[in-house]
Amino acid sequence: MALFERRRRPALPDDVRAAVPLDGGEQVLAWARDETSGAHVVATTHHLALVDAGGGLVWNRPWHEAESGTWQGESSLLTVTWVDRGVPSGWRLTEPSLLQQALRERLQASVVLADEFRTAGRRTVRVVIRQDLASGALLEQTIPGKGADLGDPQVAREAAQRMARLRSEVGL
């Protein structure tokens, strides 16, 4: 008997795997079950998907739509914020998983170049060139921090200048 035995984790349930659409060459990288809802969070090479406890696909979002992920170990809470400033997604994950690692890696893989500046009101704005990991297309994103006003002409001008510099650096 081995001194240390690896605890085998059960495979991704068949109904969950069937619910997640996989494009050519796309693979499931990691998954975890939310202890609160019973839903499954599934990370693939191109998307992050949520499958409800009944095996139905709730959403399947490309990585470039996710802004960040936060893991709070003491509460076992994984939270993802979205570029569109929609309601963050959160899950309580108590079983060991590679989901946090896959989330970090895929988010980093989608960012080609980024720049951040502070507005006169001390708010932050990020300008980012991201890659759609499924198609390889480059996308521009201007992401206002809390309270930052992209309608302010000075903020809009600064964001446009910084985006132009990023575009130039990647050949757009």
Image (cartoon, helix red, strand yellow):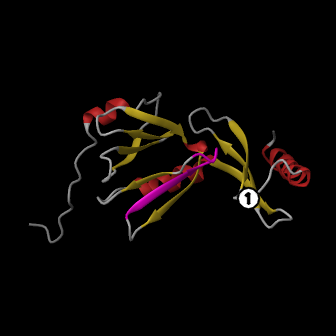
Of residues 133 and 58, the one drawn nearer to the viewer in this rendering: 58
Read off the residue under disc 1: 147
Residue displayed at 78% across by 45% down:
170
- In the displayed structure, does residue 2 sit left or right of residue 84? left
Number of numbered discs visible in the structure rendering: 1
Q: Amino acid at mark 1?
A: Gly
Of residues 143 and 164, the one drawn nearer to the viewer in this rendering: 143
> On the rendered image, what quadrant is the C terminus found in?
top right
Magenta stretch in the rendered image: 76-86
49 to 107, vertically: above or below: above
Secondary structure of the residue carrying tag 1 is loop
Dividing the picture into quadrants, the one containing residue 39 is top left
Residue 53 location in percent, x, y? Answer: 30, 40
Whether 164 is among the magenta residues is: no
> On the rendered image, what quadrant is the N terminus found in?
bottom left
Residue 71 location in percent, x, y? Answer: 46, 63
**Crowding at mark 1 (Cα within 10 Å: few <14, some 14-19, many 20+):** few
- In the displayed structure, does residue 9 sit left or right of residue 141? left
Residue 139 location in percent, x, y? Answer: 71, 39
Residue displayed at 44% across by 40% down:
49
Dividing the picture into quadrants, the one containing residue 96 is bottom left
Residue at the far left in the pictured view: 1
Residue 95 location in percent, x, y? Answer: 29, 58
Residue displayed at 49% across by 52% down:
103
Dividing the picture into quadrants, the one containing residue 63 is top right
